[in-house]
Image: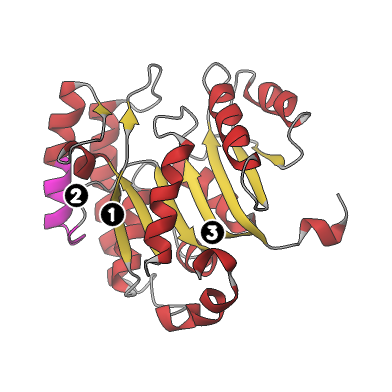
Amino acid sequence: MTQEEFYRVLDLSVIIPAHNEATRILPHLHSIRDSLSRQDRSYEIIVVDDGSQDDTIKVVRGFAKTEPALRVIPLPTCMGKGGAVRQGMLVARGRLQLFTDADGATAITELDRLEQAIRNGADIAIGSRSLASQQPGFTVNARWHRSILGGCFNTLVRLGGIREISDTQCGFKLFERSVARDLFSVSTINGYGFDLELLFVAQQRGYRIAEVPVNWTDQPGSKMRLFRDSIAIVREFSVIHRNAAKGYYSPLATPDTLAPLRSTSPLLK
């Protein structure tokens, strides 16, 4: 790849954080490649290996031999999901930037719904299991205790200042490039609470967020320890509020600065 090709702006970047995902990530990579290669668009797939101790890098690099659009960013130690996503987002070249979980709980085919929301005027489109569970035609297969705890957590989130979003934690979110750069340049949370930080700052800055129902299937082998990590997320939420009080999230950009990008991107017309 030439330097000119490396810095060329693409239509889409797909960022996948991965920690010890050697046994789960390959089917998702195949699905992404198969779906995007059928479309008339330029894209890249970025796998950020978050200090894996298994064969994740070996598996991904093996797949990369058949997919030149894929690149791997190896992190020397485990930063956490938020840190891994941030690393990928800040080097991504796509006009639109999606992060998706390595297990493929939300299939890449759901991307169409999020892109439509962007075309309709949103700056950020986030997948929602909560909305999907309330509408016919969608499938959400989740374990009962995850659903109950998730409902309690979302109530706490609303009380904490993130308004009108019923599912903050779904690992399937799409950003316009300038919005991603703005938000991830000030993000500080490396753990699972990074979603809360992004949405909190996005609402503070007036970005338009569309919550979009998506099909979702719980995958075996989840790295998230439901109760322990949920408590950690609540603690991270308190850090977010302290950061805001200290002015860490002072605006770097406003939605008005997106106008040039919106007028030049073929995906957003």
Query: What range is drawn magenta here?
Result: 153-164
Q: Could you say which is closer to the camera, residue 59 or residue 187?
A: 59
Q: Secondary structure at mark 1?
A: strand
Q: As displayed, is residue 142 above or below residue 244?
A: above
State yes or no: discs 2 and 1 in contact (Cβ < 8 Å). yes
Amino acid type, label 3: Leu
Do tag 2 and tag 3 residues touch (Cβ < 8 Å)?
no
Of circles 2 and 3, which is in front? 3
Name the mark on residue 96: 3
User: Which label number is shown at residue 211?
Assistant: 1
According to the picture, the residue beneath numbered tag 2 turns out to be 166
Indicate left or right for 200 with 266 as reference.
Answer: left
Residue 6 placement: quadrant: bottom right
Q: Earlier in the sequence, mark 2 or mark 3?
A: 3
Residue 213 falls within the magenta-colored stretch: no
Instruction: Specify whether 112 is left or right of 229.
Output: right
Viewer-closest of 194 and 258: 258
Secondary structure, mark 3, is strand
Confirm or deny contact between disc 3 and disc 1 (CB under 8 A): no
Kindly identify the amino acid type of the residue bearing the numbered disc 1: Glu
Please tell me which residue is depicted at 18% across the width and 62% down the height of the picture. Answer: 161
Q: CA distance from mark 2 to mark 1?
A: 8 Å
* Left or right: residue 268 compared with residue 69: left
**Residue 141, percent from left and from top:** 26, 24
Tag 2: residue type? Ser
x and y, in percent, of residue 217 in the image: 33, 26
